[in-house]
Amino acid sequence: MSALLDRIRGALVGLKMPRALEALDHTLQQLEKGEITAVEAIDSLLSEEYVTREGRRVDVALRTAKLMPIKTLESFDFSFQPSLDRERIAALAQLGFIRRSEVVHFLGPPGIGKSHLATALGVAAVKAGRTVYRATLAELIEALSQAERSGRLPEKIRFHARASLLIVDEIGYLPITQGGANLFFQLVNARYEKGAMIMTSNRGFAEWGEVFGDPVVATALLDRLLHHAVVVQIEGASYRLRAHADLIPEHVRANAPITPPPPPKRRGRPPKIRNGAADH
Ligand code: ADP
Ligand code: MG
């Protein structure tokens, strides 16, 4: 018996299962007292190890993906944002859009939860074992410019093209130089139909020429980013300012509606834009 136990301990060490090793004695005691069956003992040892390991994997992946601080769909108050279809977000959380390499756009004014929802979908994807990377557009362009200056642009684009989901946050807040727009276009092109993206923006697609400082690049970007796209338009009040609504001037409080996307010019294949349809 003790030789057998030594062998089990040795195997757990060799297999790098420290949690199961730790739980072994207690589990055996429970087994001897007849508190659990043999099958329950096996289950208990394996789940101890699995849960610990999975927790660690998710933790590391969330940090690598830059998804901290964590946001979840459970912590999102849908009643505060009645223009948002909860079922539609729940459908997105099934992550079919990642399998289909689609682009999800969250559009709307500041503070309405665009980044929260994007991050929450990213967290769901990490838990499902997908690789995710999140950055603001400014951070992404800065990283690409730096890589270009040091002659490592192809490598950097490959890195950002690899994740199964790339989240590009805060499109439209900061002006983009023409060089920056070109770099971003190269990245989008590298991911086109190969990997999913989530984009958040406070500006309508009609304003992208202005955002990217170049209508030609903006049109080429939209051509790819609206081809297999899900557009979620959110209209409502800022969650950040919810306690201070009375302090905000009327003209700021009323959210200017965002212009709908212009039809992308494309010969051949018709664009497949599903606006308003649930994600299946
Ligand atoms: P946006 O990206 O649209 O500017 P955020 O997603 O950053 O807005 O939201 C601002 C803050 O308010 C974040 O801390 C976010 O978690 C929180 N928040 C926004 N909307 C909601 C909501 N409906 N329920 C819970 N928290 C929310
Ligand atoms: Mg945001």
Image (cartoon, rainbow, N blue to C red):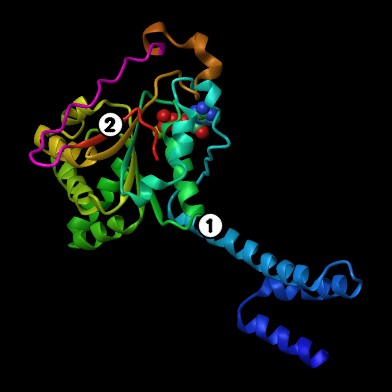
Residue identified by numbered label 2: 172
Q: Is mark 2 within 8 Å of ligand 2?
A: no
Label 1 lies in ligand 1 vicinity (Cβ under 8 Å): no
Indicate the quadrant containing the N terminus: top left, top right, bottom left or bottom right. Answer: bottom right
> Residue 113: where, in percent of width, then height?
45, 30
Query: How busy is the neighbourhood of tag 2: few (under 14 within 10 Å), some, or many (20 plus)?
Result: many
Q: Is residue 255 magenta?
A: yes
Find residue 10 and report its image quarter. bottom right
Res. 62 in view:
no
Magenta stretch secondary structure, dominant: loop
Amino acid at dot 1: Val
Left or right relative to 166: residue 157: left
Residue receiving disc 1: 58
Give percent across and percent down for residue 72.
53, 40
Image disc number at residue 152: none
Give yes or no for residue 1 being in the magenta stretch.
no
Q: Secondary structure at mark 1?
A: helix
Q: Earlier in the sequence, mark 1 or mark 2?
A: 1
Task: Find residue 170 and report its horizontal and vertical position in percent.
Answer: 34, 35
Q: Kindly state the secondary structure of the residue where label 2 is placed.
A: loop
Q: Residue at coordinates 51% horizontally, 59% vertically from top-left? A: 60
Report the span colored magenta.
Answer: 253-270
Residue visible at 53% across and 21% down?
80
The image quadrant in which ligand 2 is located: top left
Q: CA distance from mark 1 to mark 2?
A: 31 Å
